[in-house]
Amino acid sequence: MAAHKAGKLAAALILLLAVALPDLVAAECDCSDDAAGRDKARALRLKIIAIFCVLLGGAAGAAVPSLGRRFPALRPGTGLFLAVKAFAGGVILATALVHILPAAFDALGSPCLAGRGPWREFPFAGAVAMLAAIATLVVDTVATGYFRRTVARKAAAVVDEPPPEPGNHCDGDDLEAPDGHHGHAHGMSALAPAPAAGDDLVRHRVVSQVLELGVVVHSLIIGMSLGASDFPSTVRPLVPALTFHQLFEGIGLGGCIVQAKFRLKSVVAMALFFSLTTPVGVAVGIAISSVYDETIPTALVVQGLLEAAAAGILVYMALVDILAEDFMSSRVQSRARLQLALNASLLLGAGVMSMLAIWA
């Protein structure tokens, strides 16, 4: 199911690019980049290096939480896992508020959009981020409710199954009723723990898929921006910055995927989809670098709106689905040292990711 949704998401993004690209190429704008420092050959070598570095960084980050199968300290629920998850939550929050949202405001407030619509007359970046966060809340609650009702119906069907014929069961399964008849340990008494566990599983699966949507949109955009640049001075600092960026985001996404307990095929598909998105974006940017101009009005509007939407999605996911669940749990609140460790890890993740904004 996750692999199918990932495929549909990829198709939708490719369709969006196919629709927007002709306008990006054909549009004109008086704003233009300074040609000083432009070196296509040197920039291309750096971009090829970036493809492999970012790919390895994203794959390594997504794989870290899966190491819990070999290292018990990294299994979901342990103190170390919660600290890593808090660190990743800080990274995602800083990505949204320090990297993406300011870029959206810059794009939609560019001088190239002067006199070309209402983009500079209203803070569209903030409004779109707000609407994206609200839409994420709606999708989150509707999807979770739908899957919970599905699980409840399946559980009810199990409860309503007719009992087996007398004599076809083991004596150890019998329960003596007050009237002297024998029954079975089936029904709600046997299924009582299942709804809570099922609810948590459904929740983690919805969270992992919605989080991947927000991360993928942002990753594709930054990959295209890097690939379309012909300035080595711009590309060089972005290579290590985006490598660490993908590493940290991969840890956050990988932690959610591990908690969702998908089948191995779905886990691999989601991890690969995340890992490949930015390198594919870089490759697309390289392909269109000769005709693409990031100062074109249509390009600025598309980039600004997508960045703002991605920021809203990631802010909601970081605060509500990644951090709040653990920080508000009775286990964390009853252990002062664990609570302190999680807060320190959150601040460290947000601080490290914010520092990367100096180069990226």
Image: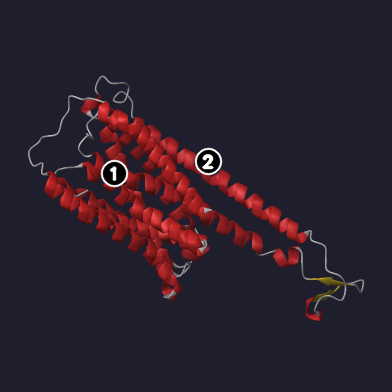
Residue with the mark numbered 1: 284
Q: Residue 79 placed where, x, y %?
A: 43, 69
- Asked whether residue 352 appears in the rendered view, the answer is no
Q: Residue at x 43, y 38 (%)?
A: 132
4, above or below 287, in the image: below
Toward the viewer: 243 or 359?
A: 243
Q: Label 1 vs label 2: CA separation? A: 32 Å
Q: Which of marks 1 and 2 is in front?
A: 1
Q: Which residue is drawn at 74% across and 66% down?
A: 189
Check disc 1 and give the amino acid type: Val
* Crowdedness near tag 1: few (<14), some (14–19) or many (≥20) residues, C-alpha within 10 Å: some
Check disc 2 and give the amino acid type: Val
Q: Residue 299 placed where, x, y %?
A: 28, 32
Residue 138 — which label?
A: 2
- Asked whether residue 212 appears in the rendered view, the answer is yes
Query: Is the residue under label 2 in contact with that under label 1 (CB below 8 Å)?
Result: no
Find numbered disc 1 in the image and state the secondary structure of the residue it sits on: helix
